[in-house]
Each structure stands twice: as C-alpha cells, then as structure tokens.
Amino acid sequence: ETGVTQTPRHLVMGMTNKKSLKCEQHLGHNAMYWYKQSAKKPLELMFVYNFKEQTENNSVPSRFSPECPNSSHLFLHLHTLQPEDSALYLCASSQDLGPGTDTQYFGPGTRLTVL
Amino acid sequence: GIQVEQSPPDLILQEGANSTLRCNFSDSVNNLQWFHQNPWGQLINLFYIPSGTKQNGRLSATTVATERYSLLYISSSQTTDSGVYFCAAASDTGGFKTIFGAGTRLFVKA
C-alpha cells in the first residue's frame, strides 16, 4: 500500500465510449502524474501536475484529457479511444517537483482495454 | 528529443551476486531517475540522481552527467530484486520532456 489509489483497476470500453480514470493520494503531496505502460513500448510519462497546475504534457493526444481539481485527486478523461490505447495507466504522486522532494509513489494502475 | 538506452536488456543472477545496470542518454539532462517494477506490476521510484552518487541499502546509483550515463548497482542480490529496472531522463532541450528507457529485466534465482 503506497498511499496512492486508482479506480477502476480494470476497464473495458468501446471506441465510442467516454470514461474516466481516477487517482487519489493520501500522502499530502503536491505533485501528481499520469503514466502509460503499453505492452511493447517504453513507459511514457503523459502529464504532470504541481499544485493543480499542469507542468508537463508529453504530446499526448487530445482524446486523453486530464483534470486535477485539487492536489489529492487526478482524473484522466477518455473519449473516442483507439485499440492501441489499451495499456496500463499508472498514477503517481510526489511531495513536490524539486530535488530531494520528488520521490514518486505509484498506484497499482488501471488496466484499460479498448475494443 | 532525448534518447535513453538501457543495457543489458535481460539479466539472470544467482542470489547473492552483484550486478551493474547501465543507462545511456543522448543529451544533457535536468533529471535522471531509476525505477523498479516488481513482477506484480508495482512501480517504485528508487533514485532521483541527475548527478553524483547515492546509496540506499544494497542499491546505489551513479550518474556522470558530462559523459551522459548512469549506473545502478545491486549488491548481494535477492529474489525480491527481480523485476524490471527503468531509467528515465528529463531534458528541457526542445521543450521539457521525460523519456524512459526500455528497461532491464532482472531475474534473481534462489
């Protein structure tokens, strides 16, 4: 138990569906992250938020829409996805983004399958 | 953008052995991190090490930023060290971006 929870743990959706992934951290951290882990590609950092503000967006397609309403919660809204978007989506949090404070704690991930 | 290469891709060790994992990166970096993903998928951040050397128990890491590489040392390996080790480099050249290597898959035999 890392203090970072993700729901749902598994999700199957069609290409026309709209769904959301949720991440919650109970660590009092200020920074939160979304990662994508596909079967045949390196781990990809998607988005970084610090104090609810987005600080990094690694050229992620607009069909993925992040939302960070407060420092404890992070959402990833999904719409019109493609089968190649099937992957494990990992959330992480860290105290801050500065040196010595950005050790990241990861959630268990959401396994997404797009049909 | 920055490129990150890890070696070896796969490694099998006998319990108790030492090992060195390498991460090469193609550009100067603001941030270099090592992660471990256990066989059940849980990811753990091991080190934040843009330069210098750090140690945490049986693990230590060294980054030589001027020569664009980082090393992760595992001493007296244990079966619980099995999994995939990733390094990730972040550079603000051409826009801030974090890139992961493909990982080194380690299996420690009892």
Image (cartoon, rainbow, N blue to C red):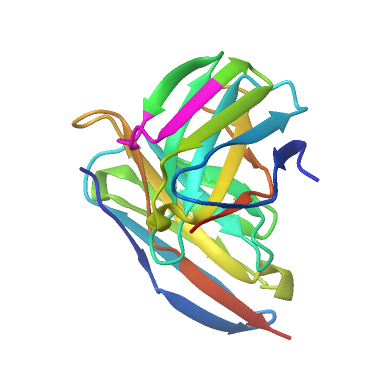
Up-down: is B47 above or below A97? below
The one nearer the camera, B26 or A91, is: A91
- The answer to if A59 sits in the magenta stretch is yes
The one nearer the camera, B47 or B40, is: B40
Q: Residue at x 60, y 68 (%)?
A: B83
Position of residue B12 measured from the top left corner of the image (x, y, whole percent): 55, 83
Q: Would you identify the image quadrant in which residue A29 lies?
A: top right
Up-down: is B16 above or below B1? below
- Confirm whether residue A101 shows in the render: no
Position of residue A26 measured from the top left corner of the image (x, y, whole percent): 78, 27
A22 with respect to A54 (left or right): right
Q: Residue at x 22, y 50 (%)?
A: B26
- Confirm whether residue B28 shows in the render: yes
Q: Residue at x 60, y 15 (%)?
A: A69
Residue range highlighted in magenta = A57-67
Position of residue A56 measured from the top left corner of the image (x, y, whole percent): 39, 27
Position of residue B101 measured from the top left corner of the image (x, y, whole percent): 38, 57
Q: Residue at x 69, y 21 (%)?
A: A72
Q: Quadrant of the N terminus of chain B?
A: top left
B16 with respect to A114 (left or right): right
